[in-house]
Image (cartoon, rainbow, N blue to C red):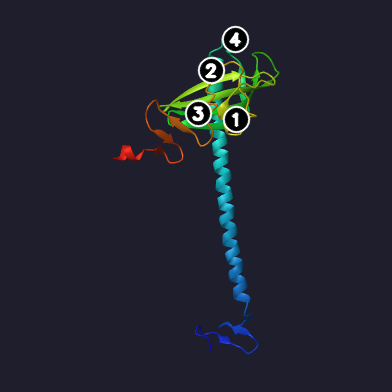
Amino acid sequence: MASDGSSWSETGTRKHKLGRLYPLDFQDKQAEKQTQSVEARGQHTYASKKEEAAANAKRWLSEEAMVAFRRYIESKDELKGLDYEFDELVHQCFHVEHYLKTFYHFNFTVKTKKPGSADWTSAMYFAQVKLICMIKRYVCYPLEQDQYGECYACENHGMGELRHPLEGIYDMGREDIQFPFYYQDSDSDEFDATTGGSESSDEDMS
């Protein structure tokens, strides 16, 4: 007699109180299905959260790119009154050399229409969003066809396809720095980005 009140038969089945007979491996299969169901739900939840995070990041980057674009057209008298709408975020690169040098580079397209016109045109733009002491600085430039200005920062991140203006004021990074980046002050210790601190010698510790 089983301890839970059900009985065991000689044919390898368990008889529950309701009198139904189940194969001995029935409960094992049910438990396996439940485990697989829980694992599937966990994987689905993780994938959903990952997709949601990626969508939120893309939305934020697109908004930042458009802030830069609006500041650009506001500085051009000939572009005032221009109708525009965001088209596509093409490339983006986040670069950190040290806590005082953090910036994003973007390639994105914007559709524009001149006042009184029914025709929309799409053009590629470059933008930089730089954070300095919790204050954002924006720059934006239109890009001509096959225009590739230099940027060591994006190249070091493997983002050579991200296009930059041939002439313009933006951060290019340093040619002699490879990931992981570090910051060398004038005569201070070296900042190590992998540890978040500085490397001190034994003499400094004494």
Sequence-earlier tag: 1 or 3:
3
Q: Residue furthest front?
A: 203
User: Disc 1 and disc 3: Cα gap in Å?
Assistant: 14 Å
Q: Using the image as rendered, state which of residue 179 and residue 112 is in the foreground.
A: 179
Q: Which mark is residue 103?
A: 3
Q: Which residue is mark 2?
A: 169
Measured as percent of width and height from the top left, residue 131 is found at 46, 27
Viewer-nearest of discs 2 and 4 = 2
Secondary structure found at label 3: strand
User: Disc 1 and disc 4: Cα gap in Å?
Assistant: 34 Å
**Picture quadrant of residue 117:** top right
Which residue type does callout 2 highlight?
A: Ile
Q: Does residue 68 lie above or below 195 as drawn?
A: above
User: Disc 1 and disc 2: Cα gap in Å?
Assistant: 18 Å
User: Disc 3 and disc 4: Cα gap in Å?
Assistant: 29 Å
Which residue does the image show at 50% across and 22% down from the upper left?
138
Q: Which residue is mark 1?
A: 155
Which residue does the image show at 61% across and 34% down from the upper left?
158
**Picture quadrant of residue 36:** bottom right
Measured as percent of width and height from the top left, residue 79 is found at 59, 13
Q: Does residue 83 lie above or below 95 as drawn?
A: above
Residues at discs 1 and 3 in contact (Cβ within 8 Å): no
Secondary structure found at label 1: helix
170 displayed left or right of 120: left
Secondary structure found at label 2: loop
202 displayed left or right of 165: left
Q: Which residue is mark 4?
A: 78
User: Disc 2 and disc 4: Cα gap in Å?
Assistant: 21 Å
